[in-house]
Amino acid sequence: MGLSQFDERKAQQYNGEIDNSNGTASVVAAPGLQFDYHLDMLFLVNTDSSSRILNLYLTIGATTEPFASVLVPARAGFDGNPPVEAMSEVLPSSQTGMVVQGGATLDLAVTVTVTSGQAIGYTLIGGLL
């Protein structure tokens, strides 16, 4: 992967976390932007001692559709463990990201509530086309 894949006009980055207070409700990781955007990477870390499955959804208007699930191992991104780069796990190897329609949101939700005091952190990197 080189810098040539980052062909957006304006870079965008979103950070956040899913913790016990979220339960299994979805969290908006990338807000609905006015223009189409390219989602390049989604890094995930997990402070929990248990692995979690994270579901990814696209919401367009009033319709929310699941498009992928990713396993986030216990302590991913900590104690020498690498973070999970979700886009490379869910897209074909020939694809270096995906275009998201303007106005659509990317939502994340765990299938089992995160342990109290722990969190799944995310960093989404992309940009406006």
Image (tube, rainbow, N blue to C red):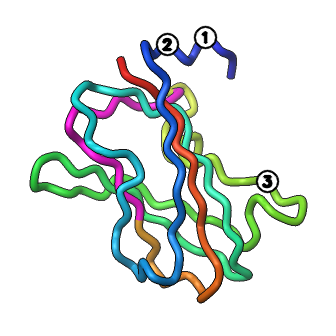
Q: Is residue 81 above or below residue 73?
A: above
Please state the horizontal and vertical placement of residue 126, each as a whole percent of the image: 48, 30
Which SS class for mark 1? Answer: helix
Please state the horizontal and vertical placement of residue 62, each as a whole percent of the image: 10, 55
Q: Residue at x 34, y 75 (%)?
A: 25
Of the 4 image quadrants, the one containing the N terminus is top right
Q: What residue is pinned by disc 3?
A: 82
| Marks 3 and 2, how far apart at CA | 26 Å
Q: Is residue 41 above or below residue 59?
A: above
Q: Quadrant of residue 22?
A: bottom left
Q: Residue at x 54, y 64 (%)?
A: 17
Closest to the observer, 17 or 54 = 17
Magenta stretch containing residue 71, yes or no? no
Amino acid under disc 2 = Asp
Residue 7 - label = 2
Please give the range of residues in magenta.
96-108
